[in-house]
């Protein structure tokens, strides 16, 4: 196999460090991770004896069975491990405090073609390309801080909750504090810093917040987070899900995402003279998010079930507007604290934790950069509770809504020139096709709700 021509993160020192850890820590095998188009984690195991060659040249695999990858006649792919992502996987603890099970490590991979050139169907490559665009515009880093919510149920076959606790519930009402604590220990052991954790609004709903990082590292963290949350829940005999809306009548799970651009170590979103402490760059970036919100909705909220969360009345954003304090707006600007200039950021509230983080962060970055590059003007702040406005009042203010279904979102995406450029010639048509197919499969189903409502009455 030919070495990749685009291995910016792969240094000789990092590869040597991986090989040393394999020897010193008696790793039994290494999982090579990458994702398909929809963000499903894919993995295969490599033995320690093969790792030196794999670090140098990658490992070949058949991509024809991976969702959105090439057809069988062009299926040869190579997974190039990024040694900087090497981490030992956490293991469960027995009653005596000893780790049990095989000692396994993981490394996240870039997918390339057999000739070593980047594979355009690799979601990690799409995010790398977005970051390249950012650097060409003079910025150094796109920092991202997603807040992933999830539910814990008794098992995967039902939605029986573990508690009836609410937001910030404590003691007996929060049955999963120990599960969250173990999850945090596992995440931190894998090099993911955690800021805080708590019970969320819905019964058996939880949130563990990672400290912000640059977008590529955070996308890697997000994939790791989702797996670790599920694994630790299973150790305790429970089932964790990132399904956006598993319970009728309760809040769904979101992934509010905080964003800022940096240059030379300074936050380019901050302006001390502005009433909102937002720079011209920040305003144009936020305007880009608003202008292109409907177009990228199918990337940020990619499932049929996602749009059962994005409805009025359950703290989910529906209307495309921005505000500093108003949580009914799509984009919120957290309040500025004196001395915390580096923390100035925009928070978009429509993504959910079942998205593909590589594609989601790439879409957000492209939309924001489009606003900067083309000088988009930020509309007026919306301080009114948008849920209380009538449709006529929203129309008068020029406030549009996010798509109301995956079918509507898929068509918005299909017509987006920006998202076509952001996702690339390989992924864009395949992704649109996947989302259209999912919507068409869903819309022909006959549900229990329909039977209960119509069968005896019609």
Image: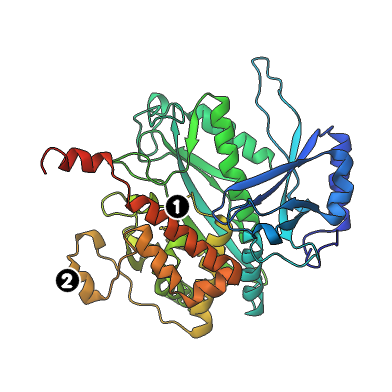
Task: Kindly give the residue lying farthest to the front in the view shown.
Answer: 73
Give 419 or 397, whichever is nearer the viewer: 419
Specify the quadrant that holds the C terminus: top left
Please say whether residue 244 is visible from this viewpoint. yes
Q: Is residue 186 above or below residue 403?
A: above
Relative horizontal placement of residue 282, taking residue 60 as reference (left or right): left
**Dot 1 and dot 2 residues touching (CB under 8 Å):** no
For the residues marked 1 and 2, what is the alpha-carbon distance in whole angstroms?
29 Å
Q: Which residue is mark 1?
A: 352
Residue 313: image x %, image y %?
A: 26, 51
Residue 94: image x %, image y %?
A: 66, 18
Task: Kindly give the residue lying farthest to the top in the view shown.
Answer: 96
Q: Is residue 119 above or below residue 212?
A: below
Residue shown at 80% from the left, 65% from the top: 116
Badge 2: residue crowd in 10 Å (few <14, some 14–19, many ≥20): few
Task: Kindly give the residue lying farthest to the left in the view shown.
Answer: 457
Give 314 or 157, whichever is nearer the viewer: 157
Give 161 or 58, whichever is nearer the viewer: 58
Q: Which residue is mark 2?
A: 392
Residue 142: image x %, image y %?
A: 60, 66
Give 172 or 183, whichever is nearer the viewer: 183
Residue shown at 17% from the left, 41% from the top: 453
Relative horizontal placement of residue 352, taking residue 386 as reference (left or right): right
Badge 1: residue crowd in 10 Å (few <14, some 14–19, many ≥20): many
Q: Is residue 218 above or below residue 209?
A: below
- Circle nearer the N terminus (1, 2): 1
- Determine the image quadrant of residue 398: bottom left
Relative horizontal placement of residue 92, taking residue 45 as reference (left or right): left
Query: For residue 343, which numbered disc appears in the image?
Result: none
């Amino acid at each position: 196999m030919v070495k990749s021509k685009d291995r910016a993160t792969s240094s000789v020192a990092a590869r040597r460090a991986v090989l040393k850890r394999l020897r010193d820590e008696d790793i039994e095998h290494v999982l090579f991770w990458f994702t398909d188009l929809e963000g499903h984690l894919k993995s295969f195991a490599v033995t320690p004896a093969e790792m030196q060659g794999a670090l140098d040249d990658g490992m070949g695999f058949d991509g024809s069975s991976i969702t959105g990858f090439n057809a069988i006649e062009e299926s040869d792919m190579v997974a190039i491990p990024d040694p900087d992502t090497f981490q030992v996987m956490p293991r469960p603890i027995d009653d005596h405090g000893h780790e049990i099970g095989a000692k396994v490590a993981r490394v996240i991979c870039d997918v390339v073609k057999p000739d070593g050139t980047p594979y355009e169907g690799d979601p990690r490559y799409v995010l790398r390309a977005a970051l390249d665009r950012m650097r060409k515009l003079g910025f150094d880093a796109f920092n991202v801080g997603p807040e992933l919510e999830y539910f814990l149920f008794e098992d995967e076959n039902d939605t029986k909750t573990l508690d009836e606790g609410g937001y910030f519930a404590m003691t007996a009402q929060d049955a999963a504090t120990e599960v969250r604590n173990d999850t945090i220990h596992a995440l931190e052991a894998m090099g993911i810093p955690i800021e805080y954790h708590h019970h969320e609004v819905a019964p058996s709903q939880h949130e563990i917040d990672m400290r912000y990082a640059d977008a590529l590292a955070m996308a890697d963290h997000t994939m790791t987070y989702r797996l670790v949350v599920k694994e630790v829940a299973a150790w305790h005999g429970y089932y964790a899900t990132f399904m956006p809306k598993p319970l009728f009548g309760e809040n769904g799970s979101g992934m509010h995402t905080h964003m800022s651009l940096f240059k030379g170590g300074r936050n380019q979103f901050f302006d001390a003279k502005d009433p909102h402490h937002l720079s011209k760059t920040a305003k144009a970036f936020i305007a880009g998010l608003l202008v292109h919100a409907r177009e990228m909705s199918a990337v940020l909220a990619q499932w049929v079930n996602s749009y059962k969360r994005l409805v009025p009345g359950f703290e989910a954003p529906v209307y495309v507007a921005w505000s500093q304090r108003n949580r009914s707006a799509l984009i919120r600007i957290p309040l500025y604290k004196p001395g915390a200039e580096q923390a100035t950021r925009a928070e978009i509230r429509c993504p959910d934790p079942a998205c593909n983080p590589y594609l989601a962060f790439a879409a957000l970055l492209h939309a924001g950069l489009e606003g900067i590059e083309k000088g988009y003007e930020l509309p007026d702040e919306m301080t009114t509770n948008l849920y209380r406005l009538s449709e006529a009042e929203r129309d008068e203010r020029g406030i549009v809504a996010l798509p109301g279904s995956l079918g509507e979102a898929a068509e918005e995406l299909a017509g987006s020139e920006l998202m076509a450029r952001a996702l690339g010639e390989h992924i864009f048509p395949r992704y649109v096709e996947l989302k259209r197919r999912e919507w068409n499969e869903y819309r022909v189903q006959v549900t229990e709700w329909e039977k209960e409502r119509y069968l005896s009455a019609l």
